[in-house]
Amino acid sequence: MSASTIAHSHTRIPSVISSEEYLSWGRYPRVVHNAVHQVYWPEEIQPILMKSDHAECLPYGLGRSYGDSCLNEGRSLIDCSRLTRILSFDRVTGRIWCEAGVSLADILRIVVPAGWFLPVTPGTKFATVGGAIANDVHGKNHHRAGSFGLHVVRFLLCRSDRGVLECCPDQNPELFGATIGGLGLTGVLLSAEIQLKQIIGDRINCESIPFDSIADFQAISTESDCKFEYTVAWVDSFSRKRLRGILFRGNHRKDFHVAQKDKSGPKIPFSFPQFLLNRRSLALFNFAYYQWKSLYGSRTSAPLDAFFYPLDSIRQWNLVYGKSGFLQYQLVIPESECDSFEEVLKVIAKDGLGSFLAVLKRFGSLRSPGMLSFPRPGLTLALDFPMRGERTLRLLATLDEIVNQAGGALYPAKDARMSPQMFEASFPKWRDFRSFIDPAMSSSFWRRVTESFPWKKS
Amino acid sequence: MLLVGRSAQHLEIVAADLRVRGAKEVITFKADLADVSQHPQVIAFVQEQFPDLECVLLAYGTMQDQEACRHSVEMSLREWESNFISAAALLTAFADIFERRKCGCIAAITSVAGDRGRSSNYVYGAAKGALSLFLQGLRGRLHNSNVRVLTIKPGPVKTPMTTGLRQSRAFANSVSVASDICRALENDSHDILYTPWYWRYVMAAVKLIPEGVFKRVSI
């Protein structure tokens, strides 16, 4: 048995598995994919792209996008979640270079003990670096640090037509800007280098302050943004009278503690029946939470995980919404249009469908290099709605109109249903982005929001 | 830590990752372990670089199209060469090394497929079964020399080897299987590790089925 015979027999040809179900985090819409390519090494991606049909593929990480921006109905996904190697980490400069499938959780596990943290983090640490770049994620410190794209030093992008390219502000700068917030459509990210930020400890000093009007929120927010690195408000979406909520604000606290063993929290084992999440139970929850926090909130310190990722500790929390899933809706409205903002909240409260989590923040003015970047100056509100069919869709369409009138925008990473008109209003320069799309890539989201606009297939 | 594999590039990527994650020293050596003629170099390198070797883990294997293997002697021979013959050859060499030192741990990944011959994958199953048997004998031989022999029997796992198969929910996540293996290596808890844990009981039941019944069932 010659060595070459044996070697040849071990060549692994990247094969295709027909889909097990690949879902987004909202579990809506549920679509079937034609094929899913599982990749284990970066060099496997280019052959897949080159053999693909036009507009056939979309990269998939850990599926934490809520709507259909990470889905590609009837076409293919390239599952990059096994590109999980960290290639280098400089403990002195805080630069980390890793494959695109590395999760933010994995990065944190390595860097926090060394005194570093993510410069920007979304509400979940179970997203990949590739996903964080493709959605240009933002977090509680947007008013200080902007969005994730501002902290990306460079990345390697694989395209069907140009092979593997290094992109940074000095090299392929336009592709760099198109890929940040580019929803995976400009090619497949292979690896990226991020500039981390130094921290003084692994806990956060946090405070909570209740507010009961939008003016109240604005005043507290202005004061808090000056003194605190992290600010975010929870809002009672059932309150019909005035905007009622609690602002949480925090700063890093000195000192590192002995590493706690990674304790997995409770896990939601199955889809909850829908009746549990109804108007009355949610309203009651919201009321109780507001009262509790008003009385006991005040000052405390919290570990990083509890402050930044409270929901992550309940694994599969998205199952609470039942089999029909839920829709996330995140809007931004210029602060000058406060009235529209209040109208949005009134419409939601009146409808009674209710949002389990309504999160409010004031965006800062730091602009990302991303072409389709969502964060812009204004007030941003993120809401969950159980998917109850037409009723939910009608409510969101009503909200769209208000947001549109106010010159606001919606966030694609959370969207499962915005119309092409709403997309145009949110991203008037989307046609500039179009020329950077890799001919082999497409997504359910993209087809949906650009369908009515005839565009040339290159 | 020493990593041996066929692709120098992949070895370097994995080594870099391990170093970032805290491995004190990672050395790589390129070799095709399925090729017995390359073994002497591997053994020589190990003995030179790692005179105090504590543990060796054989974690390589192939699974060609089993249907095609049924009809091809050549393909079957390749399957047995890579999954059993080469592994047994390596183990023979390491057994002597550890026996002389009177300490250490030898581990190898076989498979639940080696617990009973199934019509759907007996070519692969035979190789893994033979390896399990070999390890079992080795365990007895090396027991008095204080050398531990661990047989790792995973059920179906999502890996590059199984991408061609229809992967159902029964396929385990490779990260959790790896955790099980690490834990078993650290604690001296198992001679034979089934991972995920329930395969021990599934296979116990499967092994009890009378042959007359089993041959009629196409699993």
Image: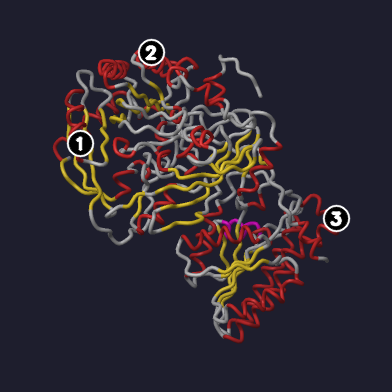
Query: Is mark 2 in CB contact (under 8 Å) with mark 3?
Result: no
Ranked by sequence position, the earlier of labels 1 and 2 is 1
Residue placed under numbered mark 3 in the picture: B72
Image check: A304 left or right of A291?
Answer: right
Image quadrant of residue A147? top left
Q: Which residue does the image show at 21% across and 47% down from the upper left? A: A205
Of badges 2 and 3, the one in the foreground is: 2
Where does label 2 land, which residue? A401
Q: Position of residue A11 (x, y in %)?
A: 73, 54
Q: Amino acid at mark 3?
A: Ser
Question: At x 52% / y 51%, what residue is drawn?
Answer: A84
Mark 2 Cα within 10 Å, few/some/many (few <14, many 20+)?
Answer: some
Q: Look at the picture and state if B56 lies above or below A167.
A: below
> Marks 2 and 3: same chain?
no
Helix, strand or loop at label 2? It is helix
Looking at the rendered structure, the secondary structure element under dot 3 is loop
Q: Secondary structure at mark 1?
A: helix
Q: Is residue B24 left or right of residue A332?
A: right
| Residue at the (56%, 59%) spot, across then down | B14
Q: Which mark is residue A224?
A: 1
Name the quadrant of the N terminus of chain A. bottom right
Answer yes or no: are tags 1 and 2 on the same subunit.
yes
Q: Quadrant of the C terminus of chain A?
A: top right
Distance Cα–Cα, label 2 vs label 3: 66 Å
**Residue A431 in picture, x, y percent from top left:** 53, 21
Mark 3 is surrounded, within 10 Å at the Cα level, by few (under 14), some (14 to 19) or many (20 or more) other residues, namely few
Work out whether A95 lies above or below B94.
above
Tags 1 and 2 touching, CB below 8 Å: no
